Image (cartoon, rainbow, N blue to C red):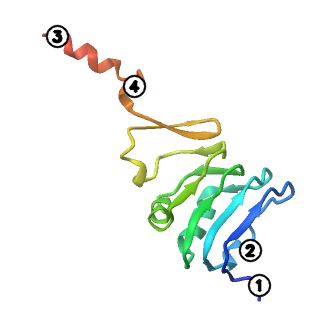
Amino acid sequence: RGLTGADNGMFIMNNQKFQSLDGLEEIKTVNGPIVISNNPRLYAPISDIIAWLDKLSGNITSVDLSFNDFYGTIPKEYCNILEKVQRFDLSNNINLCGEIPPCMKGIDDVLMKGDLFEWRDAGTSGDDDDDDDDDDDD
């Protein structure tokens, strides 16, 4: 009855009144980019949108979920989506938290700082001083 696919991408952006993703699960196929960005009142669990994205068919070229108010833990299905798309932006969703998805485990230290992800090597963090004390016992 409603929209079930998008042939030239999907764009929901810059909408100060957009608050819900209700009905999004009706869309089963997207070709092109998915941009759900800069909707500051869109408060929703990131797990719901990741689950929907993981089930989509079509040729999704990129996903931009930046500048919303998504919250919660990024689920492991995020890794499935990374295999399908060239670019995935979750920046500026300040309430993302929890365990790191398995596909990001190769990154030594992932810090969630306010509004973005910051990657750095654990060796530069200053938190590894305990290891140096053990080496002085020679």
Do tag 1 and tag 3 residues touch (Cβ < 8 Å)?
no
Q: CA distance from mark 3 to mark 4?
A: 23 Å
The residue where tag 1 is placed is 2
Residue 28 position by quadrant: bottom right
**Crowding near the residue tagged with mark 3, few <14, some 14–19, many ≥20 C-alpha atoms within 10 Å:** few
Q: Amino acid at mark 4?
A: Thr
The residue where tag 2 is placed is 23
The residue where tag 3 is placed is 137
**Sequence-first tag of 2 and 4:** 2
Instruction: Judge whether 105 appears above or below 48 on screen.
Output: above
Q: Amino acid at mark 3?
A: Asp
Instruction: Point out the frontmost of discs 2 and 1.
Output: 1
Do tag 4 and tag 1 residues touch (Cβ < 8 Å)?
no
Q: Amino acid at mark 2?
A: Gly
Residue 95 position by quadrant: top right
Q: CA distance from mark 2 to mark 4?
A: 45 Å
Do tag 2 and tag 1 residues touch (Cβ < 8 Å)?
yes
Q: Amino acid at mark 1?
A: Gly
Residue 53 is situated, as x and y percent measured from the top left of the image, at 58, 68
